[in-house]
Amino acid sequence: MKIQIQKGDNVKIISGKHKGEYGKVSSVIKNKHQVIIKNINIRTKHIKPKQTEDRGYIKKIEAPIHYSNVKLIKKIK
């Protein structure tokens, strides 16, 4: 199955927690049929310190969304 959505396309989320929101595709994961949309589906990841002197921190990352949950609005050529 071929994914019609490419990097840079404008999309609308049609289902899930972020239903009705618009965004721009920042990357496509083809083998899992998922897309990462800029500033949508933000998750927090707690990073542990690697050594005793280091400090841990909290990192915000954009989690992927399955391409069937997004609708293509504007195709970038």
Image (cartoon, rainbow, N blue to C red):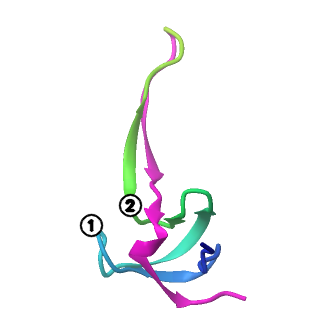
The answer to which of 19 and 24 lies nearer the viewer is 19
Question: Please, what is the three-letter code of the amino acid marked with disc 2?
Answer: Asn
Q: Residue at x 48, y 71 (%)?
A: 67
In terms of sequence position, does the residue under pointer 1 or pointer 2 come before the other? 1
Q: Quadrant of residue 31?
A: bottom right
Q: Position of residue 36 (x, y in %)?
A: 52, 63
Q: CA distance from mark 1 to mark 2?
A: 8 Å
The answer to which of 5 and 20 lies nearer the viewer is 5
Q: Is residue 54 magenta?
A: yes
**Label 2 element class:** loop
**Relative to 40, does residue 42 appear above or below in the rendering?**
above
**Relative to 75, does residue 54 appear above or below in the rendering?**
above
The residue pinned by badge 2 equals 41
Question: Please, what is the three-letter code of the amino acid marked with disc 1?
Answer: Lys
Quadrant location of the N terminus? bottom right
Which segment is the magenta one?
Answer: 53-77
Q: Residue 17: which numbered mark, if any?
A: 1
Quadrant location of the C terminus? bottom right
Q: Position of residue 74 (x, y in %)?
A: 56, 91
**Relative to 10, does residue 38 appear above or below in the rendering?**
above
Q: Residue 30: which numbered mark, if any?
A: none
Q: Position of residue 11 (x, y in %)?
A: 48, 82
